[in-house]
Image (tube, helix red, strand yellow):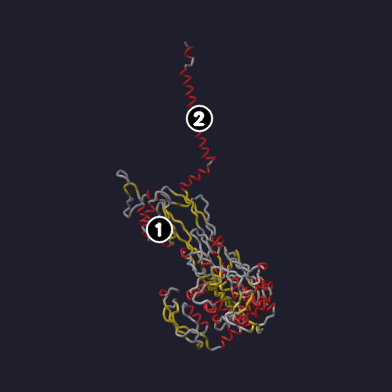
Amino acid sequence: MNDQHCIKGPDDKEFGKRLGVVVFFFSMFIAAIIGMLLNIQVVNVKKYKQKAAKQYERVVTEIAQRGVILDRNSRMLAESIESISFYADPLIVRNTPQFDENGKPVMVKATKKQKTFDNSGVVATLFAKQLGINRLECLKELTRSKGMAVLGRKIAVAKAMPLMQEKIPGVWFDKEQQRYYLNVAAQLIGSTDSRNEGSSGLELQLNKELKGRDGTRIFQRNATGVRYPAPDAQQQDAIRGNTVQLTIDGDIQSIVEDELSKAVDTFQAEAAASIVMDVRTGEILAMANNPAFDLNRRETWSPERARNRAVTDSYEPGSTFKLVMAAAATEVLNRKADDIVFANNGILPIYNLKIKDHEPYGNITFRQAIMFSSNIVAAKTAMAVGREKFNAYARNFGFGRKTGIGLIGESPGRVRSLANWDRTTLPWMGYGYQVMATPLQTLQSYAAIANDGELMRPYIIKRIVDTQGRIVMENAPQIVRRVVLAKTAKYLGKEYFQAVVDSGTAKNAALEGITVAGKTGTARRAAGGSYANPVYVSSFVGYFPVADPRYAIIVIVEKPKTAYYAATVAAPVFAGIARRMIACSEEMQKNLAVPSPEQAALGAIATVAVPELKGLRGRDAQRLLKWLKLEMDYSGDFDGVVVGQNVQPGSMVQKERVIRVALASRKSNKRS
């Protein structure tokens, strides 16, 4: 009987099996839990920490303040101002109680049996009232089912301050940078895009130097959605971009742009460009183009308006290229100003073609050939110099290669290699065809003559300074090479190019009391691949004062319609720019005050010619008259522009004479 009780029955065996299975699966379950815990807390701890952090942490990028761009006198040309943008999490806004003015939570009925909080209407009303925006648009953002709501972008700090001080659950703000420009030299300075990255001009070229280094801010969020800086996180401060100082003068730049605008309007031209250079240093004081765009209004930008024609466009220079011919004639042929040359009575048959002059000149002096811009004499002289030597002079003057100014998009122009010259290349190059040049290259060549024959590298970036005041990069005057002897340079300026202004084709470029040397150019441009119906490019390039040159200016007017000879179109623009910039620039007045025979003569005379004042600002007109030893009396708004004067331009009057002008208010003038 006892033995029977000791024997295990079938039920006991089955129970043991089942218990073993349960224990096994329970052990596996425990092992799986342990494995998951190890996976979360040991193996993939970083991954899950990041997931957890996303639930309550937010990493905010603090955009670095973009560096400023200054002119030569430290005047602000471009700067970044701080603005505020507001964002919200719609779910938190809608589901967090907001108390009304009576201290009761704002609630809406979700169902008949349930009430819920809704903060969106209160927040929409608050933002609409403070920012002056549409409440319904704001409410639409706050009722989004997913994503982030944008409540306001790039709001001025003063306007945003009351909202910044509000503690609204689910609403936060970010500081952003907005670029602001003085709005001169648009093509040179360029612009930035919505991400504060440079998109054109120097803003693009120097983007790395200007943009700085962004910072990061890590915030944590509590249960009510209020954000606060994470106490244990490493915060990285943003570093402001470097300061870029240019060689241009903001006032002179403005004057040049204004004169170009007048020329384009007057002559119904397609475009215009101008550059002002200090011939001794190579510094660019102004670089202007028309048409232009408004740097503070991105919608006005277009590729055509943003093109810096002064360095990107090349053209057949025409008669301004006769500088190369005159230099080579002086040093290779020993040609003198009084030498008699034959101009073939206005027509030179050559290789079944004809070179023509605008007047039928016969025997004239070489000085007269340059004064009256004889193409025939230029072609014959170039052939007498020879192809190898003429090519060498053209290249030594800087044609056919980049100037070294370092601006993006600069064209090298074109001078054919000798292997590609045909029999017409040399005579046609003598008067500026079958060669391509940029406005900057042409200006650089005349500046070399003004600088006693030494070609200077032009530059426009003066220096770059970091946030600690340390100079990161700095440009200095640099001589590229000598192109002609010093005595040759002086001879060319005095005997030929001063005569062009005094008695030749460029009388309209003359300045009162200051000698000017220069050359006009009226070049035909092929239209549709043919010269049968040509369009014209009018240009004048000159420098002053001749005895002690300091400044050079080039003016290019493309496709003028009401007139096309450079004497009528480009030369007066040169004179207008020069008069106004001398009157407005104390630096120029100081530099031009160096004693010279011309200035002594100016001081000795008792009468002066009254300049054209119409279109000038009151302040500019007063400075110009003061420089000429004249006084100004005015009626109207001093900040306006001159609309009339009591003495006709060009009239000779005694020094100290009072010139009365009428000034119109800025509001009543489209061009202020």
In the image, farthest residue toward the top: 1
In-front residue for pair 61/558 = 558
Residue 171 horizontal side relative to residue 203, left or right: left
- The 10 Å Cα crowd at callout 2, few under 14, some 14 to 19, many 20 or more, is few
In the image, farthest residue toward the left: 112
x and y percent of residue 527 in the render?
54, 69
**Please, is residue 21 above or below residue 599 in the view?**
above
Give the distance between the C-alpha atoms of the residues marked 2 and 1, in whole angstroms.
59 Å
In-front residue for pair 385/412 = 385
Residue 94 horizontal side relative to residue 219, left or right: left
**Residue type (three-letter) at the residue carrying disc 2:** Ser
- The 10 Å Cα crowd at callout 1, few under 14, some 14 to 19, many 20 or more, is some
In the image, farthest residue toward the front: 352
Disc number for residue 27? 2
Q: Give the labeled residue for mark 1.
A: 163
In-front residue for pair 397/480 = 397
Disc number for residue 251? none
In-front residue for pair 80/252 = 252
> What secondary structure is marked by label 1?
helix
x and y percent of residue 312 in the render?
57, 67
Answer yes or no: is residue 547 visible.
Answer: no
Quadrant location, the C terminus: bottom left
Earlier along the polypeptide chain: callout 2 or callout 1? 2
**Please, is residue 624 above or below residue 441 in the view?**
below
